[in-house]
Amino acid sequence: MFEALPAGLFVFAMRLTDMSLDTLRLLFMMRGRKLVAGLIGATQAAVFILAVSQVLRVRQATTVASAA
């Protein structure tokens, strides 16, 4: 249970970063800078994967703890 708050704040920060990168990626695409937009997109995907993996890790830990 005590892991949930820091994990939630981490996920919030990751989603905030993800959405900011999405905005930048869209702006670069509109200006024709596809290479930069692609690099930002790859970074955005990595941030999203980190956020989702943290959610699944905390969910698994709470499920195991409640089963014990």
Image: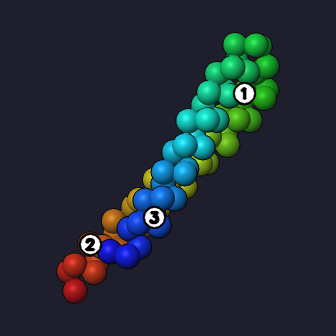
Task: Identify the secondary structure beneath mark 1.
Answer: helix
Front: mark 2 or 3: 3
Q: CA distance from mark 1 to mark 2?
A: 39 Å
Residue 41 position (above or below residue 67): above
Please state if 53 lies on the left or on the right of 30 as rendered.
left
Callout 1 amino acid: Ala
Front: mark 3 or 1: 3
Q: Assess disc 1: are there few (<14), some (14-19) or many (≥20) residues with their C-alpha within 10 Å of its C-alpha.
A: many
**Earlier sequence position, callout 1 versus callout 2:** 1
**Earlier sequence position, callout 3 versus callout 1:** 3
Quadrant in the picture for residue 8: bottom left
Q: Which residue is mark 2?
A: 63
Q: Which residue is mark 3?
A: 7
Q: CA distance from mark 3 to mark 1?
A: 29 Å
Residue 46 percent across, percent down from the top left:
61, 48
Residue 51 position (above or below residue 61): above
Q: CA distance from mark 2 to mark 3?
A: 15 Å
Q: Are marks 2 and 3 in contact (CB under 8 Å)?
A: no
Q: Which residue is mark 1?
A: 37
Task: Identify the secondary structure beneath mark 2.
Answer: helix
The residue that appears at 20% across and 80% down in the rendered structure is 67
